[in-house]
Amino acid sequence: MSTPTPIRHIGIIVGSLRQQSINKRLALAIQRLAPPSLQFNFIEIGTLPLLNQDLENALPEPVVEFKRAVEACDGLLFVTPEYNRSIPAPLKNAIDWASRPKGKNSVGGKPAAICGTSPGQLATAAVQQHLRNVLSVLNVHLMSQPELYLQFTPELIAEDGTVAADTTRQLLERFAAALAAWVERFSAP
């Protein structure tokens, strides 16, 4: 008799604050296509104040809630656009808050994956490399393969995360399955 696969909680952090974010669509699609062993929670970053060390002695409530949500996850999924070939300011701000105050790194030791979509041909390749540089310094265990950066077209992913094309659906299913396996590697029995 085999033991059931435990449920692993994945925090999704979308790097765009835009209401009609195509990266939120991508996150929804991955959530829909993921194995049942993954349970997803979108972690809000839009309410975080700009990082200011003067606020570290008494963290603002949105920061406390954000750090608590990150710490409650077994793994993280960063889904982000690319702004000026780098990390969107709201996402970088969230990562900086996650690592503060010194000695209270909420993302350290967490398994994570990065993906993103953009209308451009290079999609989100540059931002993903920048995120790898930043997150590795914070001791985040990043999944290196498969990489996922999609050139977005209007018919690629519906607003509710539905994927019409079989090839795209299969790509996202493989990515989600790899994420499940990656998080499981770092989870206690």
Image (cartoon, rainbow, N blue to C red):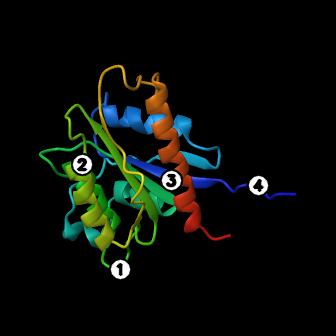
In-image side of 99 versus 183 (left or right)? left
Q: Amino acid at mark 2?
A: Ala
Say which residue label 2 marks.
125
Sequence-first tag of 3 and 1: 1
Number of residues whose C-alpha sits closer than 10 Å to that of mark 4, classed few (under 14), some (14–19) or many (20 or more): few
Say which residue label 4 marks.
4
Please say whether residue 100 is visible from this viewpoint: no
Q: At which x and y percent is residue 182?
A: 52, 60
Sequence-first tag of 4 and 1: 4
Q: At which x and y percent is residue 97?
A: 30, 63
Residue 19 position (above or below residue 129): above
Number of residues whose C-alpha sits closer than 10 Å to that of mark 1, classed few (under 14), some (14–19) or many (20 or more): few
Q: Which mark is residue 179?
A: 3
In-image side of 36 versus 50 (left or right)? right
Q: Marks 3 and 1: which is nearer the front?
A: 3
Contact (Cβ within 8 Å) of mark 3 with mark 1: no
- Residue 184, image quadrant: bottom right
